[in-house]
Amino acid sequence: MTLQTPSSESLPPLGKRPFTLATDLDGTFLGGTDADRARLYDWIEANRPTVGLVFVTGRDPDFITGMVRDGGLPRPDFVVGDVGTTIAQVHEDATVHPIPELETQIAEIWGDAGARVREALDGAPGLRLQPTEFRYRVSYDMDPAAFDPAISDRVRDMGFDPLMSNDEFFDVLPRGISKGPSLRRLIAHLGIDEGRVLAAGDTMNDYSMLVCGVPSVAVGGSEQALLTALNGYDKVHKARAIGAAGILEAIAALNLHPNTPEA
């Protein structure tokens, strides 16, 4: 059981808190044992005046609201969702509210491309369109055995970025937009010291945020393609512990909070 999140009005702004966790959800913040997750979530709630929380995820706003209300997650202060195409604040009732000034460039790059992308990839082998109509991306479930790599070239030729992750997802994103650039945009907007942020992830759609220049961790159990891509990035902590425990491990190893959590 987690502690109750204090109201936003009673907390310092993120730019004034000593530490901010910017974390992926599936396999990362939601990964590990029940005990590991409870230890991390309770530590966050017990230290809310000094710990900011940002979900950086491929999940959409409705999923995030539901997980906070019904899934026992601490309420994040902000969200970089939809693989970086949503940048939003989270209200007291756990609803997610996009920040227009941070999404202007994303919207301009994407335009009204959704229908065009769906038409171009209709019937593409190994791709099954996800039912949610996202604002600034198109997403598919992917069968890697049937997928044709030439599809990625087709997407690039159309002026968009393809992104494959965990051998099961294929996203079409606005050119140059992903988790890393959007997280940096939010950090700058909030006046957060980049050196006091920990980015945490486990699959290839986390790659851009793990190498965006803030302290970062690939938690234990990360996708092999991600670990391979991170070769040479010595500043990325490769945790041994899985999921939530890997986040705790990195906070302690990188000395990112004065009240270092117990890993």
Image (spheres, helix red, strand yellow):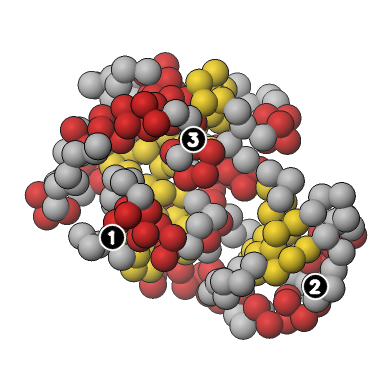
- What is the C-alpha distance between the residues marked 2 and 3? 32 Å
| Residue 76 visible here | no
Secondary structure state at the residue bearing disc 1:
loop
**Amino acid at circle 3:** Gly
Residue 218's mark?
none
Q: Earlier in the sequence, mark 2 or mark 1?
A: 1
Q: Which residue is mark 2?
A: 121
Relative side of 68 to 107, left or right: left
Please identify the quarter of the rendering in which residue 125 is found: bottom right
- What is the C-alpha distance between the residues marked 2 and 1? 34 Å
Q: Which residue is mark 1?
A: 94
Q: Residues within 10 Å of mark 2 (few under 14, many from 20)?
A: some
Residue 147 sits above or below residue 129 on the image: above
Residue 180 sits above or below residue 64 on the image: above
Name the residue rendered at 69%, 63% in the picture: 140
| Residue 66 visible here | yes
Q: Which residue is mark 3?
A: 31
Quarter containing the C terminus: top left
Name the residue rendered at 45%, 40% in the picture: 30
Please identify the quarter of the rendering in which residue 63 is found: bottom left
Secondary structure state at the residue bearing disc 2:
loop
Q: Position of residue 34 (x, y in %)?
A: 39, 31
Q: Earlier in the sequence, mark 2 or mark 3?
A: 3
Total numbered circles:
3
Name the residue rendered at 52%, 44% in the picture: 26
**Amino acid at circle 2:** Leu
Q: Residues within 10 Å of mark 1 (few under 14, many from 20)?
A: many
Please identify the quarter of the rendering in which residue 43 is found: top left
Name the residue rendered at 44%, 55% in the picture: 80
